Image (cartoon, rainbow, N blue to C red):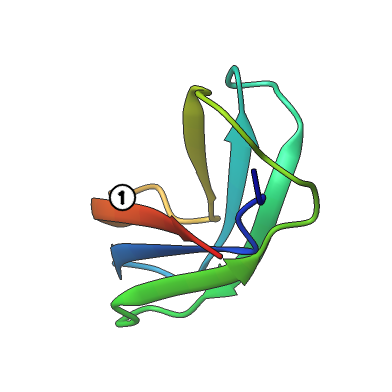
Amino acid sequence: LTSAKTVTADIEALADMTVNVRIDNYQGKVIACGKMSKGDKQFKAELTSGVIGKHAIYFEFLSDSKDNIAVLDKFTFDR
């Protein structure tokens, strides 16, 4: 089996934010991270760790905004 190399997600950024992709639980290891600016529609980042098999995936959106900051539609892992 070959591990995925990148994660791509359709996310509407409603504010400037940092996106962390975590594995197995909300406080799990960060396997990808990056920044999005308000108005961006897609997030893409290289994985910092190999991932093979079935796992729970958590997207963490961090911003100083007090309002809703993101709309996540779908995501894929790509080789």
- Quadrant assignment for the C terminus: bottom right
Task: Identify the residue at horizontal 53%, vertical 55% (top origin).
Answer: 63
Expressed as whole percent of the image width and height from the top left, the position of residue 45 reads 60, 69
Specify the amino acid type for callout 1: Asp
Q: Which residue is mark 1?
A: 67
Residue 6 located left or right of residue 58: right
Residue 52 located left or right of residue 73: right
Task: Identify the residue at horizontal 60%, vertical 19% (top origin).
Answer: 24
Expressed as whole percent of the image width and height from the top left, the position of residue 55 reads 53, 23
Task: Identify the residue at horizontal 67%, vertical 40% (top origin).
Answer: 51
- Quadrant assignment for the N terminus: top right
Expressed as whole percent of the image width and height from the top left, the position of residue 11 reads 30, 63
Count of numbered circles on the image: 1
Mark 1 closeness class: few <14, some 14–19, many ≥20 residues within 10 Å: few
Residue nearest the viewer, comparing 6 with 12: 6
Residue 29 position by quadrant: top right
Could you say whether the residue bearing mark 1 is in a helix, strand or loop? Answer: loop
